[in-house]
Structures are given as structure tokens and as C-alpha cells.
Image: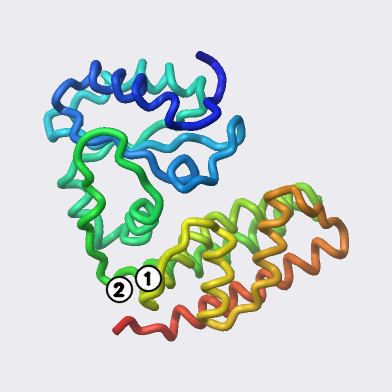
Amino acid sequence: MGRAPEHPREIVKDLVGDYRKAYGDAVVSVIMYGSAASGDYVPGASDINLMIVLSEDGIEALDRAVPVVSKWRKRNVATPLLLTEAYIHTSLDVFPLEYLNFRNSYEVVYGKDVLAELKFDAKLLRLQCEREVKGKLLLLREGFLEADGKDRHIRELLCDSLHAFVAIFKGLLYIKEQDLPAKDRIVISRLCETVGLDVGAFEAIVDIKEKRIKPAGAELEKLFKSYLKEIRKLWQIVDDLYAK
């Protein structure tokens, strides 16, 4: 105990066992999502993200999960999402983008597959994409001002924001009735080609995240401006997008 696993699969049996011990038959399913399920997991750097689906009675006993969460946090298992099936099905109208991204990259490691049959309303999905793009654009501007010209803070701002935009890109690809790739770089290139964005700024930020490049000074500021320009184009595209 105390080290990140080389592969998430090596801890699944014990992890599920701990939740079963805490909740018994109230555990409906245990689902791994994100990098741990997509093949992008990096030992020691990536968190292992879980969705624990409980019965209506089980969800009331939140305290039972505390020691389990504390134990597995030491092995890079993030605090899980605790949900019920009813919560999932009644949340698709307000969080369609989140559930679409869950379904795009997940693995059921115990119990029922509660995500497989989810259906998404493209109009609600478009509305959330618009809200997210416009909100993230404001946060990017605010973050740039708060970075006070410090290269490290600007690079962190770019990398943190890209994760959110990849999720939005998947929503837009779904609306466009395109396949949803698991790999971020492919998602970015496909969406940019589909809607007519310049892929260069987005790919440069992926390169920063992967430590392939480390722009600074004027070069970094130029990249940020280019990125912001493409995001502004994106909100105009989403604003004009009416799902069929």
C-alpha cells in the first residue's frame, strides 16, 4: 500500500472488495472511467477515477465510504462519484456532456452496466456545450490576467483548460454524429477538421502537457492569443449550431 499501481487492473479486486465489505448488496456497480479506462493512464501521474453506483438505501450511508476512500487515496484512487441509478437517469437533461464523456471511456469492474443504454438529447447537449465554451472563455481571460505574465502559470492555465475543451469537443462530435475517439489528440484533430478550427494551437498545448515543448515569453503569449482566437471562433460555431 502507498504506491500508485502500474496498471489500474491490479487493484480492482481488492478495491471492489472493500466497497462490497462496506456496502454489501447495496453496491449496484463499480465503474472505472477516464485515463484508467482509456489507455492513457500514467503510473504515478494519473488518478484512478471511479463511479460507485449504490442503491437508494446505500447512498444514505455516506460514512461507510470514508475509510475506504482514505485507504485507496494513497494509491492514487481519486475520491469516487457516489450515485444512484435514479440520479443518473434524472440528470441527463442537466449534465449530458458529463455523462457522454463517462460513457465514451469507461470499464465496468463490478456489477451492472448503468451507462450503456443512456440516450442524449442533442439540443440539450448543444446548449451545455455553448454554456461551457462561453464560461471557459471568460475564465481563460481572467486566468491570463491573474497569471501576471508568469510563464509557468500561463502554461498551467492552458493545460488545465484543454481538458475541459476536449470534453466539449466530444459533445460536438456526438451532435455531428461522428465517432468519439478515446485519445485526446485524435478528438482535437477530428473536431477541428469537422468545424473548421485551426488545430495548431490545440496540438501545441497537448505537446506542452506531454512535456514535448516548453514555450516561454513572447512565444507563449503568441500561443495563448492564438488559442483564445480559436475558442472565440468555437463559441460562434456552437452558437449557430442547431441540432437536427
The type of colouring in the image is rainbow
- Note whether 226 is above or below 102 in the view shown: below
Q: Quadrant of residue 20?
A: top left
Residue at 73% from the left image edge and 65% from the top image edge: 224
Kindly give the residue lying farthest to the right in the view shown.
218
Vertical placement of residue 146 versus 138, above or below: above
Name the residue rendered at 36%, 19% in the picture: 14
| In the displayed structure image, the side of residue 84 where residue 101 appears, left or right | right
Q: Which residue is mark 1?
A: 174
Q: Tag on residue 119?
A: none
Of marks 2 and 1, the one in the foreground? 1
The answer to which of 136 and 85 lies nearer the viewer is: 85
Residue at position x 65%, y 64% from top?
A: 141
Query: Toward the viewer: 97 or 189?
Result: 189
106, above or below 128, in the image: above
Q: Position of residue 83 (x, y in %)?
A: 25, 39
Judged from the image, the secondary structure of the residue bearing numbered disc 1 is helix
Viewer-side residue, 156 vs 112: 112
Check contact, mark 2 vs mark 1: CB within 8 A: yes
User: Which amino acid is tagged 1?
Assistant: Tyr
Rendering coords of residue 36 (x, y %): 47, 40
Residue hosting label 2: 122
User: Which amino acid type is marked by label 2?
Assistant: Ala
Mark 2 Cα-neighbour bin, 10 Å: few <14, some 14–19, many ≥20: some
